[in-house]
Amino acid sequence: MTDGGKIKQLLDRLDDLEAQMDVMNLHFNSLRDSILTPEIKAQLDEIEAERKTSIETMQAGVQSLRDEIKAAVLEAGQTVKGKYIMAIWVKGRETWDGLALKAYAKVDPKILTYMKTGEPSVTIRRL
């Protein structure tokens, strides 16, 4: 079997396991819902709505404070440590125009000795 064939089998097995987890979650949600009365479900919905509003308000405050901290650290140009959290200042990265350099390499191939290629990586996505 080719490597591609083995990997396809592994991907199909992953899909099967994830589908089994979905079925299991549906089953347990169904069991939970079967013992909840309509009154309790309504109360839980009210609690969830209040929780969601409170969390969204808090998240907005957290994001606003994060943005303020980032702006202040960028202006200060240095890392700052708090009691439990630190804001790390990182200098801007140098980047190069890869397409232009490859085109230039046709004229001066020696420039390719300075090119480094990183390690490949894999991302698994659902189709």
Image (spheres, rainbow, N blue to C red):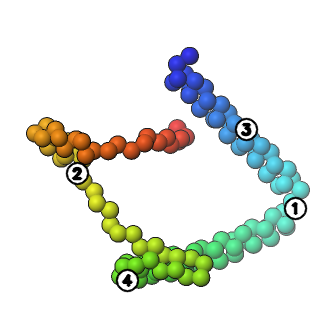
Eyeballing the image, is 44 above or below 7?
A: below
Camera-side residue of 76 and 62: 76
**Point 52% across, 38% down: residue:** 127
Q: Nearer the viewer, residue 83 or 2?
A: 83
Tell me the residue that label 2 is attached to.
Answer: 97
Q: Earlier in the sequence, mark 3 or mark 4?
A: 3
Residue 35 against residue 112 in the figure, above or below: below
Circle on res. 29: none
Amino acid type for the residue under numbered disc 4: Ala
The numbered disc on residue 76 is: 4
Secondary structure under the numbered disc 2 in the rendered image: loop
The amino acid beneath tag 2 is: Asp
Q: Earlier in the sequence, mark 3 or mark 1?
A: 3
Task: Assess disc 2: are there few (<14), some (14-19) or many (≥20) residues with their C-alpha within 10 Å of its C-alpha.
Answer: few
Q: Tag 2 or tag 4, which sits nearer the N-term? A: 4
Between the residue at mark 1 and the residue at mark 4, the CA separation in whole angstroms equals: 57 Å
Quick one: label 4, few (<14), some, or many (20+) residues within 10 Å?
Answer: few
- Residue displayed at 44% across by 77% down: 79
Answer with the quarter of the image where residue 102 lies: top left
- Given residues 36 and 3, the one toward you in this image is 3
Q: Which residue is mark 1?
A: 37
The answer to whether residue 107 is left or right of residue 31 is left
Disc 1 to disc 4: CB gap under 8 Å = no
The label shown at residue 20 is 3
The answer to the question of whether label 1 and label 2 lie on touching residues, with beta carbons closer than 8 A, is: no
User: Along the polypeptide, which appears first: circle 1 or circle 4?
Assistant: 1
Q: Describe residue 32's horizontal placement relative to residue 90 as left or right.
A: right
